[in-house]
Image (cartoon, rainbow, N blue to C red):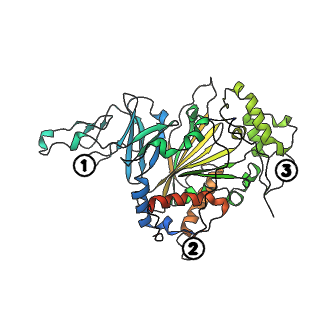
């Protein structure tokens, strides 16, 4: 059965949104058809190479800027074996430095966020300023060698963009603007700074971090793991774009998959889309196939009265999911009224474990109060639900990870619908094997 059924797509003219999100198709790269070796998901040696050549070299997402609203506000975040403090300074800038006392290695703060006047180690009361300088060493005269060099912490590069704060463990990392390019033009029109936290969760998953990234880099699995979504989105007519390190797909929402018969009644999930837009599904007289376009027109007309400024977004962005992957570990489902952001972090020592951060933000209409930030929750997979769709992914990923160990499985057999996975691993290769030699994954 041929499932290709192209829906009506609003053709975006670059002149209509010259500074908006590019919607036109990028040239498809030629990435070959090789098997992606399973060993890179299970090998401690490959995990070590990733740490040395990816995690310690690139820019990483640290947190949300509005968690650093006042001087002394800090975020303590972890990546692999490293723990990092990101701190708002008195001059409004942000600085990042290791979360470790230079005396005996004690961590200054647990993972999370807070506000301090300084960082005092609970072990021997060595005290550090907001800028990482050592302010006090009790009984300094008893250290013949004096204090540590420079009497300060090592500083990590740290910058803000798009309502978020980024850091790097690499002192010689390129400017953040160069690293993210062209994501700024793509994501800025959504104005993440106008969106408030609604969910902040960390889940420990029993799989490699790349196993998770792969799962969210394609829609081919919708018909397998998420059959209910076929009454909500078109998982077949998906535009895939690759940009240097980063990539995306554009997936139509408020429509149904060509894998299922077009229903005569409005499916419940599309009904909910209409209600959230302010439409009354009971009064709708069009066909189900017309709903996507009619929702776009309705939001364009009524958005201003609802306190929602969609002026920088094209019509497709008012319904569809523009899904981005910022290398190495950030996935974003970007919508006109919300952003779902997922940060996929490696375990420090075990290639079969990872940390999955779920950050969700919703647009706050102009004139409405800013909601209270949710408290951070942390648990292991299976302890509680994270929502039907993510539960379905989470249930499946450990079995994928276990299958990677089979002698009968050499690696991933990737099709065209999974181009983003192949591109992601090509970027990994560019970092792990910078001279173009891949001697076979360990």
Between disc 2 and disc 1, the foreground one is 2
Give how far across and how far down residue 80 sits, in percent: 41, 54
Residue 32 can be seen in this image: yes
- What residue is drawn where x is 85% and y is 34%? 283
**Count of numbered labels shown in the rendering:** 3
Query: In the image, residue 359 lies at what x, y percent?
Result: 55, 43
Of marks 3 and 1, which one's residue comes earlier in the chain? 1
Vertical relation: 48 (above or below) 364: below
Q: Spot the residue most to the top.
A: 367
Residue 374 vs residue 218, the one in the foreground: 218
Q: Please, is residue 40 above or below residue 275 in the view? A: below
CA separation in Å, label 3 and label 2: 40 Å
Q: Is residue 278 visible?
A: no
Q: What residue do we see at 62% from left, 25% from top?
A: 368
- Mark 3 or mark 2, which has the lower sequence index? 3
- Marks 3,2: beta carbons within 8 A: no
Say few, some or many: other residues with alpha carbon within 10 Å of mark 1 (under 14 / 14 to 19 / 20 or more).
few
Structural distance between the alpha carbons of marks 2 and 1: 46 Å
Which of marks 1 and 2 precedes in the sequence?
1
Describe the element under mark 2 as helix, strand or loop. Answer: loop
Q: Give the labeled residue for mark 1.
A: 104
Where does label 3 land, which residue? Answer: 263
Separation (CA) of disc 3 from disc 1: 66 Å
Residue that numbered label 2 is attached to: 409
The dot on residue 413 is: none
Q: Position of residue 89 (x, y in %)?
A: 37, 31
Q: Quadrant of the C terminus?
A: bottom left
């Amino acid at each position: 059965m041929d499932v290709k059924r192209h829906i009506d797509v609003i053709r975006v003219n670059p002149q209509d949104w010259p500074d908006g999100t590019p919607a036109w198709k990028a040239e498809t790269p030629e990435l070959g058809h090789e098997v992606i070796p399973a060993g890179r998901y299970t090998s401690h040696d490959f995990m070590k190479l990733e740490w040395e050549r990816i995690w310690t070299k690139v820019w990483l997402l640290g947190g949300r800027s509005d968690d650093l609203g006042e001087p002394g506000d800090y975020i303590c975040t972890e990546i692999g074996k490293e723990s990092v403090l990101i701190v708002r300074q008195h001059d409004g800038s942000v600085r990042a430095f290791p979360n470790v006392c230079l005396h005996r290695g004690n961590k200054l703060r647990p993972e999370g966020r807070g506000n301090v006047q300084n960082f005092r180690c609970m072990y021997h009361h060595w005290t550090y300023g907001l800028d990482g300088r050592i302010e006090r060493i009790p009984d300094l005269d008893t250290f013949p060698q004096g204090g540590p060099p420079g009497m300060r912490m090592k500083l990590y590069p740290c910058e803000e963009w798009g309502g978020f704060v980024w850091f790097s463990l690499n002192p010689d990392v390129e400017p953040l603007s160069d690293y993210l390019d062209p994501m700024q033009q793509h994501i800025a029109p959504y104005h993440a700074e106008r969106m408030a936290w609604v969910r902040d969760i960390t889940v420990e998953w029993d799989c490699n971090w790349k196993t998770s990234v792969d799962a969210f880099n394609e829609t081919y699995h919708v018909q397998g793991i998420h059959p209910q979504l076929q009454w909500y989105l078109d998982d077949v007519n998906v535009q895939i774009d690759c940009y240097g390190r980063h990539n995306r797909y554009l997936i139509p929402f408020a429509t149904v998959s060509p894998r299922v018969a077009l229903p005569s009644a409005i499916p419940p999930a599309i009904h909910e889309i209409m209600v959230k837009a302010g439409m009354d599904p009971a009064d709708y007289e069009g066909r189900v196939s017309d709903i996507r376009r009619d929702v776009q027109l309705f939001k364009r007309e009524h958005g201003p009265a609802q306190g929602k400024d969609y002026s920088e977004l094209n019509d497709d962005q008012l319904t569809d999911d523009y899904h981005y992957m910022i290398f190495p570990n950030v996935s974003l489902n970007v919508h006109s009224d919300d952003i779902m952001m997922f940060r996929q972090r490696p375990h420090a020592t075990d290639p079969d474990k990872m940390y999955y951060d779920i950050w969700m933000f919703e647009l706050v209409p102009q004139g409405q109060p800013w909601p209270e930030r949710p408290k951070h929750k942390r648990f292991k997979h299976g302890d509680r639900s994270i929502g039907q769709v993510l539960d379905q992914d989470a249930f499946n990923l450990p079995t994928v990870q276990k299958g990677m160990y089979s002698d009968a499985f050499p690696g991933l057999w990737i099709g065209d619908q999974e181009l983003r996975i192949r591109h992601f691993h090509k970027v990994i290769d560019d970092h792990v094997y910078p001279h173009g030699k891949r001697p076979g994954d360990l």
